[in-house]
Image: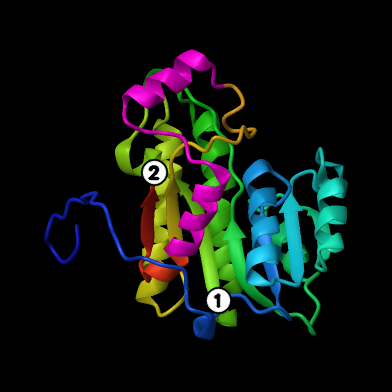
Amino acid sequence: IREGVVLVPRLAPRSGVTAPEHGERVFDSSATVLITGGTGTLGALLARHLVLEHGVGHLLLASRRGPDAPGALELRAELESLGAEVTLAACDAAERGELVRLLGMVAREHPLSAVVHAAGVIDDGVIGSLTGERLDRVLRAKADAAWYLHELTEHLQLRAFVLFSSAAGVLGGPGQGNYAAANAFLDALAAHRRAHGLAGTSIAWGLWEEVSELTGALDEIDRSRLARSGMGALSSKHGLELFDAALGAGEASCRERV
């Protein structure tokens, strides 16, 4: 409800959206990009993409386990072999104090220019089983962390502030009331930032083909159900192309599905 008018979002295909032109580069090779959930499946895919396709030279990859996350050290070695400087950090972004410490790790000579919030957890359950604790767990990782990132960086005039949202926040999902609410908040935060002249893009992803901690529990029955709903799985290549297109769309919220 805006200015007394009830509005309803509509989904429609959009054509002609391309990545930003080289003259309008979002990422600066001398600056730092922070990725929360940076050692996870999607975080790692994005980190490689930013280095290879966008020339990012400095990455701060944050996750709850940091260097102890599976594959984290190998990821750092791979990215460094591509010419990037990579810092792995253990940080619960939903804890404001930990996030302050994390941001303090950014070197002055390579200032923070972009944030990608790709962290999140799920705790699915029908509405009668969603206790306050189960709501808090999901909202903390998505919404609280996103708000603290906004609050602690809004003075920096970042060139990109990208939130990894979910189609669940747009279309809903069985047993995902808490996850839908958390992602709807991310979409609203991107709009809030844009309204205040700040960078803000929320990408409401569908299912990716790559198996992650969030989707690792899906079995063939679950995937068949999603396929029948019309929600196909994104390949890594297609997903990263859509990431670039979302940055070039000039809108607060982008819904990405196949």
Between 255 and 183, the residue placed more toward the observer is 255
> Residue at the spot x=82%, y=41% of the render?
71
Badge 2 element = loop
Left or right, residue 200 beside residue 12: right
Q: Quadrant of residue 171?
A: top left
Let me know if residue 105 appears in the view.
yes
Mark 1 / mark 2, whichever is N-terminal: 1
Left or right, residue 194 beside residue 56: left
Name the amino acid, label 1. Answer: Val
Residue at the top extreme? 221
Left or right, residue 100 beside residue 90: left
> Residue at the spot x=38%, y=19% of the render?
225
Let me know if residue 37 appears in the view.
no
What is the magenta segment's predominant secondary structure?
helix
In the figure, 203 relative to 197: above or below? above
Q: CA distance from mark 1 to mark 2?
A: 23 Å
Q: Residues within 10 Å of mark 1 (few under 14, many from 20)?
A: some
Between 87 and 196, the residue placed more toward the observer is 87
Between 30 and 145, the residue placed more toward the observer is 30
Name the amino acid, label 2. Answer: Arg
The question of residue 234 being in magenta is answered with yes
The circle drawn on residue 26 is 1
Badge 1 element = loop
Left or right, residue 25 beside residue 172: right
Q: Which residues are magenta?
A: 218-245
Question: Looking at the figure, which quarter contains the C terminus?
Answer: top left
The question of residue 194 being in magenta is answered with no
Residue 119 spot, x, y in % from top left:
61, 47
Residue 143 spot, x, y in % from top left:
51, 50
User: What residue is shown with label 2?
Assistant: 257
In the figure, 183 relative to 242: above or below? above
Instruction: Please give the count of numbered marks on the rendered protein.
Output: 2
